[in-house]
Amino acid sequence: MQIITLTTDMGVRDHYVAAIKGAIFRLTPNARIVDVSHTVKPFDIAEAAYYIASCFEDFPEGTVHVVGVDSEPMINFSGSEGSFPSVLVYKGHYFVSNDNGFFGAFLQDEQPDAFYRIDDVLSRQDLFKFPTKNMLVPAACRLLNGEAVDSFASVFPSYKKAFALTAVIETNLIKGNVIHIDNYGNLITNVNQTLFERFGKDTPFTIYYRNRDYHIDEISPTYNAVPSGEKVALFNSNGQLEIAINRGANLSNGGAEKLFGVRIGDIIRIEFTPRGSRNTLESLF
């Protein structure tokens, strides 16, 4: 099965995505194309990494994922190391992107199975005008057509790291961030369920957001566990803590994002009060 996914910042208003798909069908007529998103904020590799990380394991191994975000290569620009078209192999999947920090944002602390730089593309200046179509797609289609990655790319020892917001643990506290706001206005954080449960499943807690103006002290199993229009916290299908307004996108407030005035990057604090803690004792007086 020749499955290829596309994630770009090109939008759907212009012809760019159609041109990419046309190039794929020309090189691989039997390809099955899946659009992950074409509304990534321009040049936002962290958002692209979030989308891919959230869904790639739903695809069968051997799937090729093309990431056309900030895809034009740079060669020693302003003294930097540059960025080059590359292929990452991870958990049986192939990820084809410019090495602009995407791979680092995607993997975070994980290690790849292999990493390659694509050969013989930087000498062709005509390819730079549409690098996703002219550089990344041909490499992706070679993989789809059964070619070994080392037949057109060379092993490279490292990829660019990227700054990524990560949740941290302090004494009786998890400090995280909002990393994504979805189409419903739901606030998705970088606090995962495994980290949360390190404090114990029955330990009382309070989730504070918007500078402590708002808080939630329970995790619900589903959105509909609370009435429509009520705030809710739950772990989503990817195991990440999410703060939402149940059916808020259908109401005048426009969901949790608008009601709470929270933005991407804002801090989320989860304060735990385990038995015998100072906070627990003070509550008795």
Image (cartoon, grey):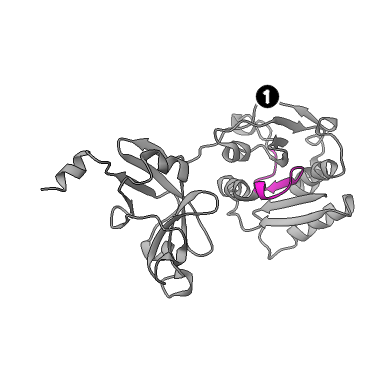
Residue 49 painted magenta: no
What crowding class fits label 1: few (fewer than 14 Cα within 10 Å), some (14-19), or many (20 or more)?
A: few
Q: Residue 9 lies in what quarter of the image?
A: bottom right
Q: Measuring from the top left, give residue 65's x and y in whole percent.
A: 72, 46
Q: Would residue 175 appear left or right of 153 to someone viewing this image?
A: left
> Residue sitting at 51 percent across and 48 percent down?
239
**Residue name at image x 79 percent, y 44 percent:** 140
For the record, the magenta segment spans 56-73
Residue 78 is situated, as x and y percent measured from the top left of the image, at 60, 33
Residue positioned 71% across, 26% down in the render: 156
Residue drawn at point x = 74 percent, y = 43 percent = 61
Q: Amino acid at mark 1?
A: Pro
Q: Position of residue 223 (x, y in %)?
A: 46, 64
**Disc 1 target residue:** 157
Residue nearest the observer in this picture, 130 or 56: 56
In the depicted view, which residue is nearer to us: 258 or 122? 258
Instruction: Name the one closer to the observer, 186 or 61.
Output: 61
Is residue 93 shown left or right of residue 258?
right
Q: Position of residue 207 (x, y in %)?
A: 34, 51
Above or below, 110 relative to 65: above
